Image: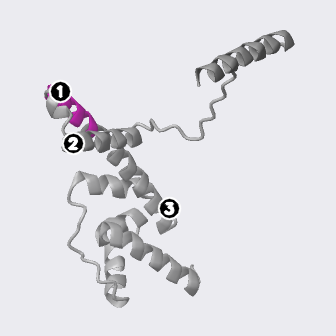
Amino acid sequence: MLSRAEAAAYRNQAFLLAAQLGLTPAAIALGIKPERIRQWNKRYGWHISAIREPANARDRDLAEASRRVTQPMEAFANLMAVEGDRTRAAMARTSRRAFEHADTVSDEALHELPRGVALEKHARVASIAHNWQSQNVNVGVQVNVPLPDQAERDEMRSIDAKLDEIAKRLR
């Protein structure tokens, strides 16, 4: 049995989950009776619509992914993971379609500003979806430049002096 403080914290987390999903999907995700969460909605004045039922496969999958967890925040984390995977897949599909369409467009049309901006945005979306961005990449480059020895430096100085003399005469 939960203490009053723990029960209140549980209800608050259930409220957050219900606000995101709806009452019945939240109840399914938490493993409690839908009637209980409806009573909490009425008693505590959450004003969450009971209309959103798990009518489609997406909601049922989300609720199924969150079953058998003890805390509403764990259920919410599971739901966000499922949504993240689906969102990433949709982003990848959208980007692929945009670039497939860009292959059919003429070169002149590709250089138009609005289309270029749109393709750049699709490229950013694809980068996010496919994790193409490199984070914390440290590139080490070593360049070996041979330095002149004393004889070569003396020769360069004498050439510089001769060129300076020619420049003075030309003025």
**Quadrant position of residue 103:** top left
Labels 1, 3: front one: 1
Could you tell me the amino acid type at mark 1?
A: Asp
Magenta segment boundaries in residue numbering: 95-105
Labels 2, 3: front one: 2
- Horizontal arrangement in the rendering, residue 161 relative to residue 118 (left or right): right
Q: Residue at x 46, y 74 (%)?
A: 13
Q: Residue at x 59, y 36 (%)?
A: 137
Relative to 53, say whether 62 is above or below: above
Q: Does the rendering let one see residue 148?
A: no
Mark 1 to mark 3 CA distance (whole Å): 50 Å
At which x and y percent is residue 62?
34, 55
- Determine if the magenta segment contains residue 89: no
Residue contact between numbered discs 1 and 3, judged by CB atoms under 8 Å: no
Mark 2 to mark 3 CA distance (whole Å): 45 Å
Question: Within 10 angstroms of label 1, few (less than 14), some, or many (20 or more) residues?
Answer: few
For residue 74, the mark is 3
